[in-house]
Amino acid sequence: LVIPNADSAKDLGLLVELVNENQVSVLNQTPSLFYVFADYILEYNLQDAVTSLRYVVFGGESLNTLKLVRWLEEFASGTTLVNMYGITETTVHLTAKVVTQGGVTSNVGKVLCDQYILL
């Protein structure tokens, strides 16, 4: 388990370094932070620094899949993106949907095992 300190959470370069040095394989982020994280990696050609990432799990806000197109094109075979949904009062992980290159619509996915949801 790797938890970024305040500096790493605010500085994209330090966050990329943290992922690289600790070989982070699962990254849990809000979509808005991941958009800028992904843009930073692609803009500065830092793809090799995040090859350890196997899963990126989104939660906490609505996901705009159109903002993930460049990432999906670059990392299509290496990183699985998962949109999760749940309300804060219970759990942020109640449903899940794997985001794919062809899937331009965002949805909350399917209910996880042993869960119940009414929308």
Image (cartoon, rainbow, N blue to C red):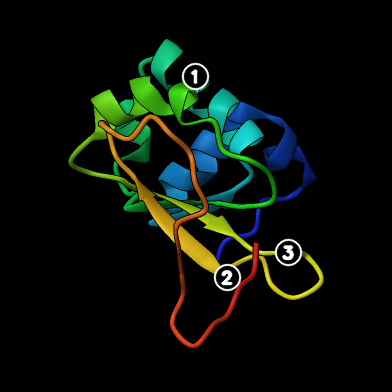
Q: Is residue 31 above or below residue 40?
A: below
Q: CA distance from mark 3 to mark 2?
A: 8 Å
For disc 2, the marked residue is 94
Circles 2 and 1, Cβ within 8 Å, touching? The answer is no
Q: Nearer the viewer, residue 41 or 8?
A: 41
| Secondary element at image label 2 | loop
Q: Residue visible at 79% across and 45% down?
A: 6
Is label 2 or label 1 in front?
2
Q: Residue visible at 69% across and 72% down?
A: 91
| Secondary element at image label 1 | helix
The amino acid marked with disc number 3 is Ile
For disc 1, the marked residue is 39
In the shown orientation, is residue 67 left or right of residue 119?
left
Q: Nearer the viewer, residue 74 or 96?
A: 96
Residue 61, image x, y percentages: 68, 44
State the residue lying farthest toward the left: 77
Q: Nearer the viewer, residue 10 or 36?
A: 36
Q: Give the mark, 3 or 2, whose residue is nearer the N terminus.
A: 3
Q: Is residue 118 above or below residue 46?
A: below
For disc 3, the marked residue is 87
Write down the quadrant of residue 70 in the picture: top left
Circles 3 and 2, Cβ within 8 Å, touching? The answer is yes
Q: Which mark is residue 67?
A: none
Residue 37, image x, y percentages: 54, 29
The amino acid marked with disc number 2 is Leu
The amino acid marked with disc number 1 is Asp
Circles 1 and 3, Cβ within 8 Å, touching? The answer is no
Q: Give the mark, 2 or 1, whose residue is nearer the N terminus.
A: 1
Q: Residues within 10 Å of mark 1 (few under 14, many from 20)?
A: some
